[in-house]
Amino acid sequence: MTQRLPVTITVNEKTYSREVEPRLLLSDFLRHELGLTGTHVGCEHGVCGACTILFDGESARSCLIFAVQADGHEITTVEGLAQSTKQLHPIQQAFWEAHGLQCGYCTPGILMTLVPFLKENPDPTEDEIRHALSGNLCRCTGYQHIVDAVKLAADKMR
Amino acid sequence: MKPAPFEYYVPDSIEEAIALLRDHGSDAKLLAGGQSLVPAMNFRVVQPSALIDLNRVKELDYVREEENCVRIGAMTRERTLEFEPLISKRFPLLAEAMPHVAHPQIRNRGTLGGSLANADPAAELPVIMLALGARLNARSVDSERWVEASSFFSGMFMTDLAEGEMLVEIELPSSPLRTGWSFLEVAPRAGDYALMGIAALVTLDENKVCTQAKLVYLNAGDGPVEGKESAQLLEGETLNDELIDSAAALASGQEINPFGNIHASVEYQRHLANVLTRKALKTAGKRAAGEENLQ
């Protein structure tokens, strides 16, 4: 019989209890169990970075973590960034203003990578920004506007 | 791209983990950071019937300083090592290599023990462990033993670990005085698998004569590859450009055995090894002699 395990996971400060199969990926848990489809699934083997979330405040690939492993932990997804539908997070606002996205598929992963990065590096150089984003693939922008958006976000947050 | 079903176990002690490993035999896999195992499971290249998750075994997560060594628990995150002052102070070679280990998101989850047990020939950490002369502690229900890093890596994704054994601790012996270091690699993009890489250590005596040298390469064979004869060329000598060129030629031309891949021919990999060896030895030599201003 298929094993199902109870989990209690806090996502964006709200606590959810579910029973899940051990093989359920955290990315699929967020999307299919909780309906939080802001976390995008690209490659499902840790290369593209689209599924990046915060696991206890640190960026991680949600496609490389099983939902059972998140039991008792705190997850933040892109849905947890904006304070309200009217007020974007400063990083989101900067991406809007600097045209830091085109199709938007990679954007949630990039935003979640940047949250801890800008906390640790409030005044990053272009080199540091590009290094921080090396684990997030974007096929549209050529990255230049993304880098501009990160600089703008850093300015807004200082 | 979904893993095949498996039974999930989540021990919270070493004792419990190795008992589970004994009970489930070779059908079980230990889950450390999961940054290599989970992709392989998503592709269904690996289909363990049982997964033993070590992420709640807190006693495997530590960096401890002792007089002659530093001890690191197998479940210590790569990101912890990257920012641990003890590591940058005592093992700057390891600190220098850390930013090259995949991406920050991967290093937040990936562990030292996981990378070593995975034994990817293109990985940085096995190469560093070999260069630093690490000793690895393996435990099973009825045994405990120490393995030298030089005996631990036995082939492509293969280690000396026997069925039922788990890697528990890594011991890094203190480096001798006047030891210089350098880690260099060439990758198509930051964080990607490197086409070639080298860890170099050079120890000098008071008269700047090289007493010990280590050259270890990644993606240069079926595991971390040591340039033993090229290192011997340097020992007992004062480093100079000519000698360094000879060592680089020997290591890159004869001692490594790269396979070539879609991104680089064997010839190009050997060329990279030659260039990187020369650069690394010069940097390590300067650092050993205290001639480089460090921050």
Image (tube, grey):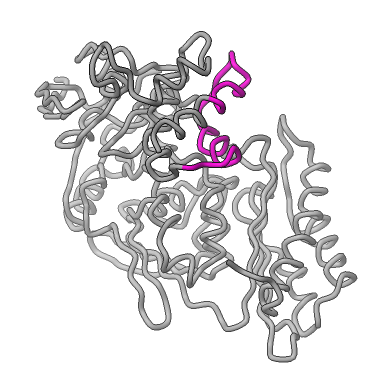
Left or right of B164 on screen, residue B107: right
Residue B199: percent from the left, percent from the top?
A: 64, 60
Point out the residue furthest to the top here.
Answer: A103
Q: Looking at the image, can residue B46 be seen?
A: no
The picture places residue A2, in percent across and down from the top left corner, at 16, 20
- Outermost residue on the bottom side: it is B206
Numbered circles on residues, count: 0
> In which image quadrant can residue B182 be found?
bottom right
In this view, the residue in front, B118 or B156, is: B118
Measured as percent of width and height from the top left, residue B167 is found at 36, 57
Magenta span covers which residues?
A123-148
State the quadrant of the N terminus of chain B.
top left
Relative side of A103 to A53, left or right? right
Residue visible at 37% across and 51% down in the picture: B77
Dividing the picture into quadrants, the one containing residue A50 is top left
Residue at 34% x, 18% y is: A39
A124 within the magenta span: yes
Q: Is residue B161 above or below residue B246?
A: above
In the rendered image, residue B18, in percent from the top left (x then y), is placed at 23, 54
Residue appearing at x 72%, y 66% in the figure: B283
Q: Is residue A16 visible?
A: yes
Is B166 placed left or right of B149 in the picture? Answer: left
Residue A73 occupies which quadrant of the picture? top left
Decide whether residue A157 is among the magenta residues: no
Name of the residue lying farthest toward the right: B242
In this view, A96 is above or below B229: above
Pick the quarter of the image with the C terminus of chain B. bottom right
Write the residue at 53% across / 49% down: B99
Whether residue B271 is situated above or below residue B43 in the rendered picture: below
Q: Nearer the viewer, residue B205 or A53?
A: A53
> Which sits in the foreground, B10 or B238?
B238
